[in-house]
Image: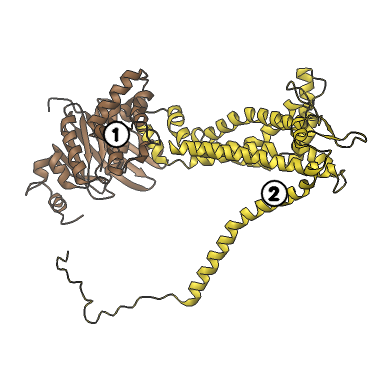
Chain colours: A brown, B yellow
Amino acid sequence: MAEPPCIEIRDLRLAYGPKEVLRGISLDVLPNEIFGVIGPAQSGKTSLLRCLNRTIDFVPTARVQGTIRVDGDEVRRTKDVFALRRKIGMVAPLPVGLPLSIYDNVAFAPRCAGLTRKADLEAMVEQCLRQAALWEEVKDRLDSLGTRLSGGQQQRLTIARALSHQPEILCLDEFSIAIDPVTTMRIEEVLKELRAHMTIILVTNLTQQARRLADRTLFLWNGEIVELDRTDVIFSEQPANRKTYEYVNGIFG
Amino acid sequence: MNSGAMPQEPAEGWAVRRARRGLWALAGERLLEGLIYLCGISAIVFVLGIFFFVFREAFPVLGKENFSLTQFLFSEQWYPTSATNKRYGVLAMIAGTLSVTALAMVLAVPFGLGAAIYISEFCGSRVKETLKIVIELLAAIPSVVWGFVGLTVMSRLIVQYTGAPVGVNILNGGIILALMSVPIIVSIGEDALKAVPDQYREAGIALGATRWQLVWRVLLPAAKTGLLAAVLLGVGRAVGETMAVLMATGHAVHIPHSLLDSVRTLTANIAAELGEAPEGSDHYRVLFLTGVLLFTLTFIVNLTADFIVRGIRKK
């Protein structure tokens, strides 16, 4: 652990009104690892991600305590929340194609950040679409509406969009829910390549996906960390916690 | 699961008892269907009916030798009660309606849309509630009260600040109409923005957009059809408004050359003269023809908007 952690979370607590969703989470995410998060519904996986890029601010009843540091910068006190959000790429479970053209969807974040030269934008769009394994399918219709694409294509479009601001951290929240297994596999290959450039947080309901991709896996249950360890330990016959074994083998949950 | 080709028989003792709906339930459903159909159809029937009756009153004048349609549309001579030479030209009033409406929209659209954006995206919830109530109150003010404001307050201000000889003119009518259209544009525009799914906002925010970038690059494109509808309803109100413009524009039949000229609008003309025109006279019928013209104007506006909206959707 010579390298400083990319994300440092200490005693993070989150409540929506009276309902506690995260009950004291502490963990480190290391640079350039794929960090898997598994756990049943309502265990706080998505909320954890929303605390990271502070989109949690838009839930009026949410109360956050504890500290989160991204690159040593305290998230909850950061001066420039927009810069923070640009550091973090976010892919939602159901694709949200903005009602813009494919090109504008991908060019959205760079434009917001102030990139205006056409040649730069075009190169950026192409690169991101290629990385998301979508370029070949849409290169001839970049100006048609992004919302017209099929579900799987839209999801890859959102991945391209998340890559477009060249994030240091890419968060994927159950990205494969709406797409077929073949496309899922293609994106998984993409993720393996991307990890050379960024840290990836992979929230997934498919425990096998975490097993295939993640270096370390966190098992979250009811807002608490049950176990966090190397993926091969989590999926071994002897994880530290009995619950982990039962969950990953489909005995409960 | 079952790989065999044989369909499975229900197991012994598994009585199939599907609930059946009674005859009355079916009849009730038919009845409701019929009622809904009637409601839907009635809108069309009413529009056609209104058009028919207005047109029936206007039609006979079209054949008269002392009336010509080109004169009606392209002459500014409006002397319906002249003893020797009656002339029915409404060009000046078309110009009046268009100029007042145009000025009202120039003022009301930016203000209205700006306010809608502010209420929907920028202000806190308490300010929002207050503003919405105030705007609804504004929308509820009767048009004759607006006309009164135009005639007294606004007219005095205009004379004072522009040095115009009279204060009732295009500027006055345009401002009054703008004030009347803004509440409509705001409340419908706000609805349109509210209808944009929150996911879009969150996606935009997560991509690092500032609030203004979010509004400009995501919300406006997403809500454009609704916003256009808001603007159109505002235009509709401005074109159709009668009492306020009658009181605020000066009622002079005259093609305007500046904002400070008095004009008469098509609607105000009908309202002011219909009561004095003997029923069945040419004058009376020409006023109804003016109604048909207004009808056509609004129809064209709506149709254009429809095409624009469809054009936007296609892309």
Q: Are marks 2 and 1 on the same chain?
A: no
Q: Which residue: 82% across, 20% down? A: B165
**Residue under label 2:** B51
Q: Position of residue A217 (x, y in %)?
A: 16, 41
Residue neighbourhood size for the residue with mark 2, other residues' Cα within 10 Å, grouped as few (<14), some (14–19), many (≥20): some
Q: Quadrant of residue A156?
A: top left
Secondary-structure class at tag 2: helix
A135 left or right, relative to B245: left
Q: Which residue: 84% across, 38% down? A: B66
The residue closer to the viewer here, A107 or B139, is A107
Q: Which mark is residue A138?
A: 1
Q: Amino acid at mark 2?
A: Phe
Asked whether the viewer can see residue B289, the reply is yes
Host chain of mark 2: B
Q: Position of residue B246 (x, y in %)?
A: 78, 35
Up-down relation of residue B61 to residue A30 (above or below): below
Q: Amino acid at mark 1?
A: Val
Residue that lies at the very extreme toward the front in this rendered image: B65
Up-down relation of residue B58 to residue B269 (above or below): below
Q: Quadrant of residue A78?
A: top left
Host chain of mark 1: A
Asked whether the viewer can see residue B184, the reply is no
